[in-house]
Image: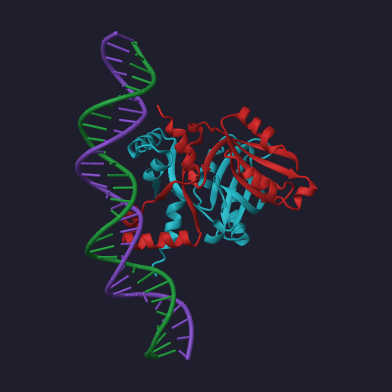
Chain colours: A red, B cyan, C purple, D green
Amino acid sequence: MKDIKPKLIKLFKEGYCTPQIAKIAKMLKEPSTTIHYNIKKLEKEGKIKTYKAVFDYKKIDEGFCAFVLISLSPDEYGDPERITKELSKHPEIESVDIITGDWELMLKVRTKNQDEYYNLVRNVISRKGIIKIKTLTSLKQIKTEFVCL
Amino acid sequence: MKDIKPKLIKLFKEGYCTPQIAKIAKMLKEPSTTIHYNIKKLEKEGKIKTYKAVFDYKKIDEGFCAFVLISLSPDEYGDPERITKELSKHPEIESVDIITGDWELMLKVRTKNQDEYYNLVRNVISRKGIIKIKTLTSLKQIKTEFVCL
DNA sequence: AATATAATTGAATATTATTCAATTTTATTG
DNA sequence: CAATAAAATTGAATAATATTCAATTATATT
């Protein structure tokens, strides 16, 4: 057994997919060349970033999901992009946003379970510049990435 | 002009994409039939829900992004799935989660601008059973759907 | 150890994306 | 409002790709 599946999951998280032009052409009742032309245009304009898979995360050992509110120290607050770039590197972190209100950052995080989430908080999220965090754990996911589960 | 692009964007939000088997085979240095076999398995096991596009949302008139915390009335709290199913139907709502803590639901929402977000709050989010909401507006998105912007 | 099940693979085929040149539509400019 | 340029649409031909199938190998089960 070559253990291909975890490699596939990793690749599909960010890309390695492509549009189904023939299927779309049939659906919209337009020539496939017209569909092709319009898709390539969307890509060239930078409107489409990538094509990727959406998973049933419970089934791929990423059943734990949480939103993390982060408070930054005053010195980091002026240029939060250093920390956000660093956080973005980690594959467990689905999204990173700079937000308004009582907290500076919002993360969405997926790990296998609560133990691994704890490790992520200790090793990745709790670092210099981050002075306080608050975790909102997802008890049930109804929709993700525009896809109903 | 046939205005194909908005139709494509709508389709690509939920699917109409497919894996690039040849490309993956080259990358992993495995026969394409092996890759094919493993992908079909992931699909049959329900681990892969769909293949879709990720957009640069600012460029497709969905530049406004917010997280919405929702408090439910006590009678809805026992069976929140009715409301969450209803909310999930709306294309502006990227994700719906039932969460722990002071609030019951967390939404991630994308609209053209703040005005349209206001309309969404009035027409969709503010309804019977939802007694309080709090909006955390995204000032800057660094990573979304596992994809760095 | 014997058998059944699952995974891998190459060769053949079916399907699909892509290219290209021609045509039509839309936008621009004097 | 023509005249011209630019953008979008399309069919036919080709290139690339996914899929099927049967055979082989590896793994799991009893």
Q: Quadrant of residue B97?
A: top right
Q: Quick check: D23 left or right of A9?
A: left
Left or right: residue B22 versus residue A13 is left
The one nearer the camera, B36 or A145, is: B36
Classify residue B138 as left or right of residue B61: right
Q: Residue at x 71, y 43 (%)?
A: A70
* Viewer-proximal residue among B20 and A138: B20
> Could you tell me residue A111's position as x and y percent?
58, 33
Res A30 seen here: no
Q: Compared to A40, does A115 lie above or below?
A: above
Relative to A34, does residue B81 appear above or below in the rendering? above
Q: Residue furthest right?
A: A74
Q: The N terminus of chain A is located in which quarter?
A: top left
Residue A61 x, y percent position in the rendering? 52, 31
Point out residue B116 in the picture as x, y percentages from the top left corner.
59, 60
Q: Which residue is located at x 47 percent, y 34 percent?
A: A6
Q: How many labels were placed on the picture?
A: 0
Residue at position x 34%, y 39% in the image: B32
Q: Is residue A127 visible?
A: yes
